[in-house]
Amino acid sequence: MTAMASLVRHVTVDCADAYRLATFWAGVLDASLADDDNPGDPEALVETSSVKLLFVTVPEPKTVKNRVHLDLQPRDRTRDEEVKRLLALGATLVADHRRPDGRGWVTLADIEGNEFCVELSEAERSG
């Protein structure tokens, strides 16, 4: 009998307010929260066809740079259009790594300061 490898069930993010942060990420991913998630809940789940993000309220504040972060690739927008949209949702600019040749990425932070990157779309990569 062949042993099976583990699966990643969720990417879990510790945070100050699970519902609020999950609502932000639901907007980023054009997804929705689980039906049983409500303001004040200690956990909130955002599920897409490719990832499940579980947000868990913890008492400790974020104090250092993330050791793990998400890299986003826009599906139907350019990288720059997506950065503009995410800034409008409440993200903040951390570092701009866009290069003169159009390549590169942008590092943003979500509403609780967790860093993530926005890369080129597939169309921009193959164009």
Image (tube, grey):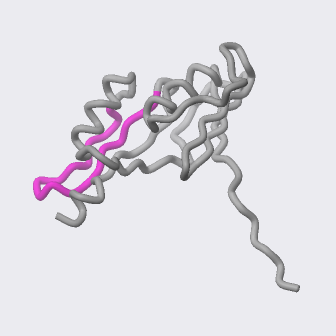
Residue 109 falls inside the magenta stretch: yes
Q: Is residue 26 left or right of residue 43?
A: left
Looking at the picture, does residue 80 appear above or below residue 50? above
Q: Quadrant of residue 41?
A: top right
Q: Residue furthest left?
A: 100
* Residue at x-position 55% and y-position 30%: 32
Image location (x, y in percent) of residue 94: 35, 35
* Residue at x-position 83% and y-position 79%: 3
* Residue at x-position 49% and y-position 47%: 70
Looking at the picture, does residue 75 appear above or below residue 95? below
* Residue at x-position 54% and y-position 24%: 23
From which residue to which does the magenta span run?
Answer: 93-110
Q: Quadrant of the N terminus?
A: bottom right
Q: Residue furthest top?
A: 40
Q: Quadrant of residue 7?
A: bottom right
Q: Residue furthest bottom?
A: 1
Q: Quadrant of the C terminus?
A: bottom left
